[in-house]
Amino acid sequence: MERPRHQGMAKNTYMRWRLPLVCLLWEVAMIVLFGVFVRFGAEADAHWEEEKREMNLTSDIENDFYFRYPSFQDVHVMIFVGFGFLMTFLKRYGFGAVGFNFLLAAFGIQWALLMQGWFHSFKDGKILIGVENLINADFCVGSVCIAFGAILGKTSPIQLLVMTLFQVTLFSVNEYILLNLLHVKDAGGSMTIHTFGAYFGLTVTRVLYRPNLEQSKDKQGSVYHSDLFAMIGTLYLWMYWPSFNSAISDHGDAQHRSAINTYCSLASCVLTTMAFSSMLQKKGKLDMVHIQNATLAGGVAVGTSAEMMLTPYGSLIVGSISGIVSTVGYVYFTPFLDSRLHIQDTCGIHNLHAMPGLIGGIVGAITAAAATEDVYGKEGFIKAFDFTGMYQTRTPSIQGGFQAAGIVVSLLMALVGGAIVGGILKLPIWGDAAAENCFEDEVYWEVPEDEESDAYHMHNPDKPASP
Amino acid sequence: MERPRHQGMAKNTYMRWRLPLVCLLWEVAMIVLFGVFVRFGAEADAHWEEEKREMNLTSDIENDFYFRYPSFQDVHVMIFVGFGFLMTFLKRYGFGAVGFNFLLAAFGIQWALLMQGWFHSFKDGKILIGVENLINADFCVGSVCIAFGAILGKTSPIQLLVMTLFQVTLFSVNEYILLNLLHVKDAGGSMTIHTFGAYFGLTVTRVLYRPNLEQSKDKQGSVYHSDLFAMIGTLYLWMYWPSFNSAISDHGDAQHRSAINTYCSLASCVLTTMAFSSMLQKKGKLDMVHIQNATLAGGVAVGTSAEMMLTPYGSLIVGSISGIVSTVGYVYFTPFLDSRLHIQDTCGIHNLHAMPGLIGGIVGAITAAAATEDVYGKEGFIKAFDFTGMYQTRTPSIQGGFQAAGIVVSLLMALVGGAIVGGILKLPIWGDAAAENCFEDEVYWEVPEDEESDAYHMHNPDKPASP
Amino acid sequence: MERPRHQGMAKNTYMRWRLPLVCLLWEVAMIVLFGVFVRFGAEADAHWEEEKREMNLTSDIENDFYFRYPSFQDVHVMIFVGFGFLMTFLKRYGFGAVGFNFLLAAFGIQWALLMQGWFHSFKDGKILIGVENLINADFCVGSVCIAFGAILGKTSPIQLLVMTLFQVTLFSVNEYILLNLLHVKDAGGSMTIHTFGAYFGLTVTRVLYRPNLEQSKDKQGSVYHSDLFAMIGTLYLWMYWPSFNSAISDHGDAQHRSAINTYCSLASCVLTTMAFSSMLQKKGKLDMVHIQNATLAGGVAVGTSAEMMLTPYGSLIVGSISGIVSTVGYVYFTPFLDSRLHIQDTCGIHNLHAMPGLIGGIVGAITAAAATEDVYGKEGFIKAFDFTGMYQTRTPSIQGGFQAAGIVVSLLMALVGGAIVGGILKLPIWGDAAAENCFEDEVYWEVPEDEESDAYHMHNPDKPASP
C-alpha cells in the first residue's frame, strides 16, 4: 500500500494478513458447520431409487432438479454476472465490482445454505439440501449484492465479508418471519430481497457517511467502455428476471405465470424509462445510468405478485409505473438523499431496489386482497395462497393485510439491522480506504502497469499523461 | 444538441418531447389493448389444476413451460445480448447498438404478442398466452433486429419505434399467410424471420439512401475493444442458435433433431468462413467482420429444415455453403450493393440474413419435397409436416412447392412493405441525424466526458501519447 | 505479413493458402465421414413415435433432450465464451483468444462426434447421435481448449487445427480405455478432460519451447479492460460448472447431486483463492490472474467425485484445497516450470487444470473406495457405479484402484501423445510467428487501424487529441 502513505488522510488498507485471515476463518467455519449439519435432500441422495418407489413416482423427470435447475442457472448468472457487471460502470473500479461481488456472493451462498437450512430444511438434526436451497441461497445473496451497490467503492473486502455474514443472518430471520410466521407470499422477493436488501444497504451507507467523498468525485463516473460492460450486467438481469421471479414458485401454472408477468412488466418498463430519461434532461438525450438501472425496476416491482393472477396488462401497468418512479428517482431523489440525508448511494439502489421493492410489496398485497375463487378456480385459489392447514380460514383481504405487514417488518429489520451492522463496519479495523482513494481499484488490486506510458493512463493517476 | 448547430447540414435531432411522446403513446396503447385482449393461456392460468384433470395429465412436468422455457431463455438472450452486442462493433455507436436494440425489442415483443395473438391464439375474444407466445414474440422482434442492422447508426430512436410498429404488423401478416394459408413449415424462421427481415431492412435502407454518408466514414469502422464486445454477441447467437431453431418445434424428436442439425450446420460454417476470410484477403489475414457475422449463416440456412430429417451430414453441407456465400458476400457484394444499388447496409445483413435466409428457404423446400414415409416412419411423416385434417392429402412434392411459394411471398411482403415503411421513415419529422453525425452516440446519448484526454491509448503503442 | 519481414527472425506466417486449405480439407473430410457414418439416434429420429410405443413411454418429456439440453447449452457456453474469453486477458491477443478458440472448437466437435461415436454410439455400421453426444463432443473439445491455454499466443491457427485433430483422437482413445476397459467413473472429466488435456498441452508447449520468448514479454501482460473481458470467461465457467459436472450423469439424483457438490466446491474455492492471492503478495493486494483462474479449480477437482456421495462438506474441503494449490501454483510453480523445465505455460493451465485434475482423480478414487451400501442404498450403490453385468462383483476398493489406474493412464497418454504431437507441430511448415511477434493479433488478424492517433478520443470530439 504505497499511495495512501504519501497522502494526507492515509488509512491502513494493507490487506495481507487481515483478508486471508477472515476468508480462511469464514471458510473453516463453513466446513465445520456443513460437516455437522448439511446432507443431501431425498432427491439428490443416492437413495432416490427407493424414494421414488415410496413416493410412487414413475420417472426420474419428476425429480425437482428438472423443474428448477434451468431457472437456478439463470438466477446464478444474475447474481454473479448480472450484479457483478452492472457495477463495473465506474471507470476505475471494475475489478472491485466484479471481484468483490464474486467474493461476497461465494461466501454468502454457503452461509445462506446454513441459515435458511436451519429455518426451512431442518429434519432430524440435519439440513437436507436440493436445488431449491441453491436458488434460495442465491436469492439471499442477491440482497447482499443489492446492499453492496450502495457502498460500492467505499469499503474494504473485509467489511464486505463482515456485512455479508450479518446480512445473510438477518435476511434469514426476516424471511422466516414473513414466510412462516406471517404466511406471506413473496416468491420473487420484492419484500425479502429488494426492500430488505436496499434499505439495509442504504442504512449502512448512511452510517458510513463520508463527508469528504467529493475528493474522489472524478472517479465516480463512467467511461465509454465501462458503460458497455455495465450493459452486460443490465441485460442479463433483465433477460433472466422471469426466471428469478418464477424459480421457486409452485410447479406448473405458477412458474409459467410468473415468467409471463415478469416478461411483460420488464418490457413496459424499458419504454417508460427511455421516455423519462429523455424527458428529464434538458438536451433530451438518453442517460446510460437510467438505461442500465431503471429498466430493471419492472422485475423488482412484480416480485411478489408475478406468481399471482396479476394478468399481463396488470404487469404492463406495474412495469410502466416502476420505470417512471425509478428514472425520476435517479434524476431527483439520489442527489437529494446525498445532499440532505447524507445517504451516499453509489449505484442508486434506492431507485432500482428500494422504491420498486416497496411498489412490489404493495402490488402484492393488493393482488392478494383482490383474489377470488372465480379468478383462480377453487383448487387454484387454495394452492396459490397455500390456504391449507392452520391457514384454511384465511380470506384474501386478511392475506392482503399480512402481505402489507410483511413490508413493514422487512423495512424495520432493514433499518435496525443496517444501523447495527453499519456501526460495526465503522470500527477502524477493517481497512477501508481514505475518501480520496475511493472508487479506485489500485487500493486492493494489482492493477496492470501498462509499461508503455500511454496504454491506459487511468491506472496511474499520479503520473501526468503528458510529461 | 449542440454539435449539429455548428455544422452545415444541421438537422434537428432534439428528442426531448418527441421520443417520450412516442414511447408513452405506444405503451399506453399496449396497456389498453392488453387489458382488452390478453389473458393467460390454460397452462399459465390458476385453473391449471382443473385443466390437468380434464386433459388427463398426471404431472406438472407436462406443462409446456418445461418443454420450452429453457429454449425461450436462450432465444431471449439472442435477441437482447446477441443482436445488441453484435452491433457494438462500431467504434462510437455502442450505446446506440445495445440501447436502441433494447428499446425496439422491448416494444416489439409487446406488439408482437398482440399481433401474433390475434392470428394464432385468439379464442372467445381473448388472446391466451403461454411460453410459446413469448418465444414467437421474440422471434418476430428478431426480424426487426435484423432490419435494424441495415440502418444501424443512421436513424433516430423514433424512426426505429415507428419501423418496429409496422414491421411487426407485416411480419405477423406474412407469418399468417405462410403458416396458416400455405401450411408451410418454418420453425426456425429462414423465411419468416430472416428472408423477410433482411429484405425489409435492405429496402428501408435503400429508400433512406444517404448520398453523403462518406462524411462519417471514419466512424464506420471498429476499434480493438469494440470488436471484442461484438464477439460477445456473435458467440451468444452462435451457441444458442440450436435453441432458436428448436424452440417451437413439436415436443420430442423434432426439438431434439432441430438442435442437432443446427449444431452441425454452425460448426461447419465456422470452418468455411475462416477459410474464405483468409483466402479473399491479399495478406491472408482473418477479418473480424467475417468471423463476427458469416459464422452465423449456418444457423440461418437450416432455419426451415432443421426440424426435418435433414441429417447431420446434410447440415454440414448447408452450413459449409452458407459460410462461403456469406463471406464472399462481405468481400464482394456489400461494396457492390453500396456503390451500384445505393443500398447502405451497415452490418451486412444481406450476407448474414438475406442470402442465407433464401438458402434456408430453398433447402427447406427441397428437404420437404424429398421426404418419404420410409425416412420419417408413417406416424412421424404425418406429424412432421402436420399432414392432417384438410392437409392429409398433401404429398411431399406439393409441400415442397408451397415451401417455395413461401419464399416468394416473404420476399414480396418484404420489398413492398419495406418500400412503404421506408417512405414513412423518410418524412423529415423523426429527428434523424445529418450524414456527418451518423454512427455517433453523442447525438442521442449522454456520453461520458473522459476528463483526462488520454483515456485509452493502447491501440497505437508506436505513437506516443503526447507528442 | 509486413512486420516480420522487417525483423531479424522473420518467419513466414502468410496464411492465405495454407489456412484455407487445411480448413476446407478438414471440413470436406467431415462431410464425407458424416455422410457415411452419422445418423440421428432414436430420440432425435422421426421414428420416435414408434420408439416411444416400444419403450412404453407415455410422454415426450421422457426424451433425453429434456433431461440434458439445458446442461448442454451451459456446457456449450463454457467452451465458446468461457474458454474463449478467459484467454482474452492478454492485451493484444483478444482476437486470437476468442477467434482461434472458436475455430478449433468448431472443428473439434465435429471430429469428436465421429471419434467418440465410433467408440460409444456405433450400431449396425452407423453412429447414432443425440444430445448426450453433443455434450461429450463439447467435453472432448474442452480438453483441447485447455491445451490451447498453454500455447496461447505462440502458435498459428494451422497448428491449432492439426493439434485438435490429434488431440481429439487421443482423447477418445483414452476415454475409451478409462470408461469402457477400466470401467472408471469420470462424469465431470477430472481425468479424461483436465488431467489429459493439461498434461498434453504442457508437453506440447515443452516441445515447442521458445528460448527467446522474452522478446515479446511486454505483450504477455494484461491491460485494465482485457482483465474485465477475461472475467466474463471466468464467471461463465464458474457459474455453469455445476452443469458441466452433471451434464452426463445418470438421470435423477446423480445429476442433482453433481450440481450441488460442484456448487459447494466452487464457492469454497473462491474464498481460499482470495485468501492466498492476498497472502502471497508483499503488498497484500489481490491479483486478477488468480481470481480469473484459481477460483475455477474447485470445479475441476470434483469432476470425478461430484456425482458420488461426496457430500457438501466434502466438496467444501476439496474446493478449499484446490483453490490454495492453484493459487500457490501461479505464484511459485509457473515461474519454476518456465525457468527450470522450459515449460512456457501462457495461461497457467498447470495450476488450473493439471494439479486440480490430479486432485480430482485422487478424490474420485478415494470417494469410490469409501462407498458403502449403507450410504448409497442397495440400488443406489449399484446404479452409481454401474456394478452390473461383468462388473457386478466389483467392490468399492477395487473400483478405487481402477480409478487410480485411470489417472496414470491419462497421464501417460497425455505425455506420450503430447510429445509426438508437439514434434509434429515443430515442423517448420505451419506458419507460426517469430518469438518477438508472439501474443500479437496483428500476425494473423486484420486489426483495426485507429486512423486518428487518439483511438478513443471520441468522447471529446471538439478537443484535438494532440494539442
Image (cartoon, coloured by chain):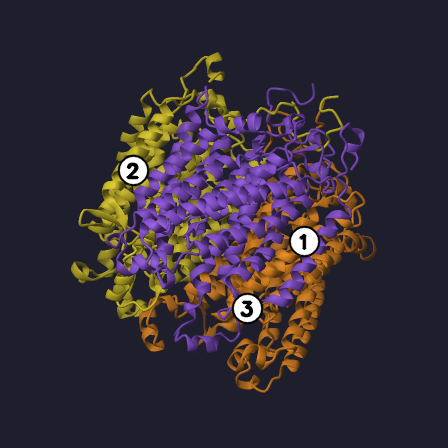
Chain colours: A orange, B purple, C yellow
Q: Are marks 3 and 2 on the same chain?
A: no
Q: In the rendered structure, find residue C31 and report the number of the disc placed on it.
A: 2
Element assignment for label 2: helix
Residue picked out by circle 1 = A271
From mark 3 to mark 2, how far is it between C-alphas? 46 Å
Q: Position of residue C333 (x, y in %)?
A: 43, 37
Q: Quick check: A172 above or below B212?
A: below
In depth, the one of C341 and C162 nearer the eye is: C162
On what subunit does the disc labeled 1 rest? A
Q: Quick check: A206 above or below A391?
A: above
- For badge 3, the amino acid type reads Phe
In depth, the one of B212 and C123 nearer the eye is: B212
Residue picked out by circle 3 = B40
The quarter of the picture where the C terminus of chain C appears is top right
Q: Residue at x 54, y 63 (%)?
A: A259
From mark 2 to mark 1, how far is it between C-alphas? 48 Å
